[in-house]
Image (spheres, rainbow, N blue to C red):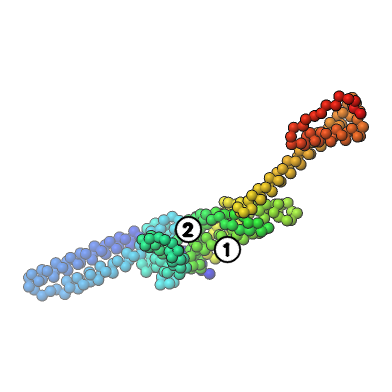
Amino acid sequence: MSVEKQIKAKSGWGMLAVVCVAFVAIVVVFILSIIGLADAEDAGVPINPLHGWGLGLSIAAFCLVWIPVCGFFTLQPGQARVCILFGDYKGTVRDGGFRWANPFYSRSMGTNASAEDATAEVLSKSSLSLGKQISVAAKASSNLSTKVSVRARTLNGEILKVNDKMGNPIEIANVVVWHVADTAKALFDVDNYEQFVSTQAETALRHVASIYAYDHLEDNSDDAGAITLRSNIEEVSEALKRELTQRLAPAGVTVDDARLTHLAYAPEIAQAMLRRQQAEAVIAARKKIVEGAVSMVDMAVKELADGGTIELDEERKAQMASNLMVVLCGESEAHPVLNTSSLY
């Protein structure tokens, strides 16, 4: 396992001044040498060896002066550069601004086999023109730079069809906020850390969705407090974050937040689940109506008995209770029939 070690890079302004002075000096020596050689030739006198050496050295110095120029680089806030010298990891620069470091530090990670294979597969299955294919390949190769962004990033996952704890197909999607905490692990311990994050985010979501039921009615346990995907969003999100933190630790990636953005039944069972939910709503409403009707019938019987104006035997009380229950619990409006004869 690689471990990040931070190093300091010199300010680029001082080295830029040195390079500019050296460039001016080289140009001056080159011009003076040319003038000296031309004057000696015009005067017909022997050539001064210093002019020859000056011309040769100025040309050589002009070629070598571009080497330190390759050491200049800039870092914006939220960026870091991994310094690799001939395959040896030297450290990571996190100081922003105009910097200068060893010009022989690598600026890319070299060839990425998995990225090339994935790009070739996409291009082979696509109908893009040659120009667009070249731009896609160039974009894929540009991701191999040793300059790494350590800013927070957002990964919007696609909608996945998975099975919950009870085996019912559901659709689920998530959003993950993450950032690179260890640049050495991100570049050296995994092949492509961005692709690694995307793959592990999908794997973790599938695993979390499979260990919880969609709702309480899907859970065959008698525990009404069991965690479900629909009712316990905070608990499920926390479990997803823990799962991702564990899976992304080898890549030096820290998960800031993980949330569900989509949760629904799969289309093939959505209608059946909707009818079930409607039936549950009807049952709950009927239960409430019956409870209220029983309370009203009991109150009516007690009020008539306490008033003493009408004396009812047990049979008449039962008949009145039955009539009131029919009136109160019926879905359609009741049409009473008036009895004009005696009570009995």
Q: Is residue 141 left or right of residue 235?
A: left
Q: Is residue 322 above or below residue 3?
A: above
Residue at 62 percent across and 61 percent down: it is 207
Quarter of the rendering containing residue 112: bottom left
Q: Rounded to the nearest whole Å, what is the CA distance between mark 2 and mark 1? A: 19 Å
Q: Amino acid at mark 1?
A: Arg
Whether residue 242 appears in this view of the structure is: no
Q: Is residue 1 left or right of residue 322?
A: left
Q: Which residue is disc 1 drawn over?
A: 247
Dot 2: element: loop
Judge by depth and name the residue closer to the eye, 247 or 299.
299
Provide residue 20's location: percent of width, then percent of height.
Answer: 27, 61
Judge by depth and name the residue closer to the eye, 335 or 93.
335
Provide residue 287's location: percent of width, then percent of height.
Answer: 76, 41
Provide residue 183's location: percent of width, then percent of height.
Answer: 48, 63
Dot 1: element: helix
Q: Which residue is disc 2 drawn over?
A: 150
Q: Nearer the viewer, mark 2 or mark 1?
A: 1
Which residue is situated farthest in the left direction here?
43
* Quarter of the figure that contains the C terminus: top right
Judge by depth and name the residue closer to the eye, 271 or 134.
271
Residue at 41 percent across and 56 percent down: it is 76
Residue at 46 percent across and 66 percent down: it is 121
Q: Amino acid at mark 2?
A: Val
Quarter of the rendering containing residue 313: top right
Whether residue 98 appears in this view of the structure is: yes
Looking at the image, tell me whether mark 2 or mark 1 is earlier in sequence order: 2
